[in-house]
Image (cartoon, rainbow, N blue to C red):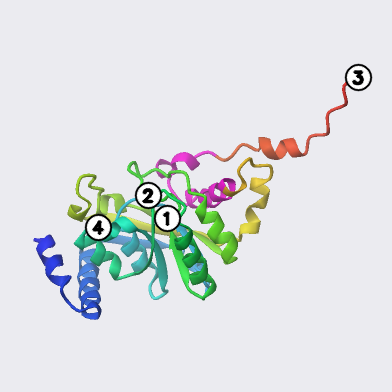
């Protein structure tokens, strides 16, 4: 039934189609998603790069609702264009298409330009939905975008969307919505220079920066969601920089 409905809506003129789909989705979310947003006071009144964990294809619209009336531009995987339902659902938000699991330079360039142009951007640094709901390691590109844009970075944590719209590995266009308790938690903004003490001496500085950014998201999540960021980094690399030089061999 839903496939037929979305197929019919896809034939509408773009402006009408976006309004109809958005209204429909708002009604479904009102009925099924018991959504709580925490930390609204942490949202700055300037363009920001928002970073968030990724659990479900419901994440984008859930966050779009949570941040209204603020306008966000989402980096969204190109595979969302692969089915009528996901294409129309993503169309109601402003998006920059990005190729997953690859260094999509054009998408990153557009994200930086969007931020410098005065709009906020939201990215899922893991690059894919987590099948276990636990955090995956962030991709390096998020650090590059943040450094080049020079805007504040705001960590955001999502919980419950993996139950609102569970992943269907065999048919993404056939994913269904269920009643679920959903929580969006916004943390305090930070600047990339605030992370420098955490990445001193790292073998891969860009990955270390991405990891430091993602640890801010992990702090907003319950332990069962923290995944690879459940434990703080070991300070060995920093400690080595402060060790006195070894005495020369006799």
* Residue position marked by numbered label 3 in the rendering: 250
Q: Name the spot of residue 74 as percent of width and height, x first.
A: 40, 64
In this view, the residue farthest toward the top is 250
Residue 194 can be seen, yes or no: yes
* Residue position marked by numbered label 2 in the rendering: 128
Q: Are marks 1 and 2 in contact (CB under 8 Å)?
A: yes
**Which badge, 4 or 2, is on the more N-terminal residue?**
4
Numbered label attached to residue 82: 4
Numbered label attached to residue 207: none
The local crowd at label 2, few if under 14, some if 14 to 19, many if 20 or more residues have their Cα within 10 Å, is some
Magenta segment range?
Answer: 207-231
How far apart are the alpha carbons under marks 3 and 1?
A: 54 Å
Q: Taking 179 as reference, is 200 left or right?
A: right
**Which badge, 4 or 3, is on the more N-terminal residue?**
4
**Frontmost residue, 187 versus 136:** 136
Residue 46 can be seen, yes or no: no
Q: Residue at x 61, y 36 (%)?
A: 234
* Residue position marked by numbered label 1 in the rendering: 124
Disc 3 on helix, strand or loop?
A: loop
How far apart are the alpha carbons under marks 3 and 2?
A: 55 Å
Q: Is residue 99 magenta?
A: no
Which of labels 1 and 4 is toward the front?
4
Which of labels 3 and 1 is toward the front?
3
Q: Name the spot of residue 125 as percent of width and height, x first.
A: 45, 53
**Which badge, 3 or 1, is on the more N-terminal residue?**
1
Disc 4 on helix, strand or loop?
A: helix
């Amino acid at each position: 039934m839903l496939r037929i409905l979305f197929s019919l809506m896809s034939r509408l003129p773009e402006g009408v189609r976006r309004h109809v789909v958005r209204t429909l989705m708002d009604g479904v979310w009102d009925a099924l998603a018991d959504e709580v947003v925490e930390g609204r006071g942490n949202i700055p009144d300037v363009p920001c790069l928002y970073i968030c964990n990724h659990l479900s294809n419901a994440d984008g619209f859930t966050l779009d609702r949570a941040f209204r009336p603020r306008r966000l531009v989402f980096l969204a995987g190109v595979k969302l264009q692969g089915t009528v339902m996901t294409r129309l659902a993503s169309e109601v938000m402003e998006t920059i298409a990005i190729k997953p699991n690859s260094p999509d330079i054009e998408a990153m360039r557009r994200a930086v330009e969007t931020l410098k142009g005065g709009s906020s951007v939201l990215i899922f640094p893991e690059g894919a939905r987590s099948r276990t709901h636990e955090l995956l390691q962030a991709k390096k590109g998020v650090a590059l975008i943040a450094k080049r844009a020079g805007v504040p970075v705001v960590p955001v944590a999502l919980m419950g969307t993996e139950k609102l719209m569970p992943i269907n590995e065999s048919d993404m266009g056939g994913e269904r919505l269920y009643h679920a308790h959903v929580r969006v938690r916004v943390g305090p903004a930070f600047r990339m220079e605030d992370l420098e003490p955490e990445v001193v001496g790292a073998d891969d500085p860009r990955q270390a920066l991405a990891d430091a950014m993602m640890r801010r998201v992990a702090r907003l999540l319950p332990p069962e969601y923290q995944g690879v960021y459940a434990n703080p980094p070991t300070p060995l690399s920093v400690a080595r920089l402060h060790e006195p030089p070894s005495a020369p061999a006799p």
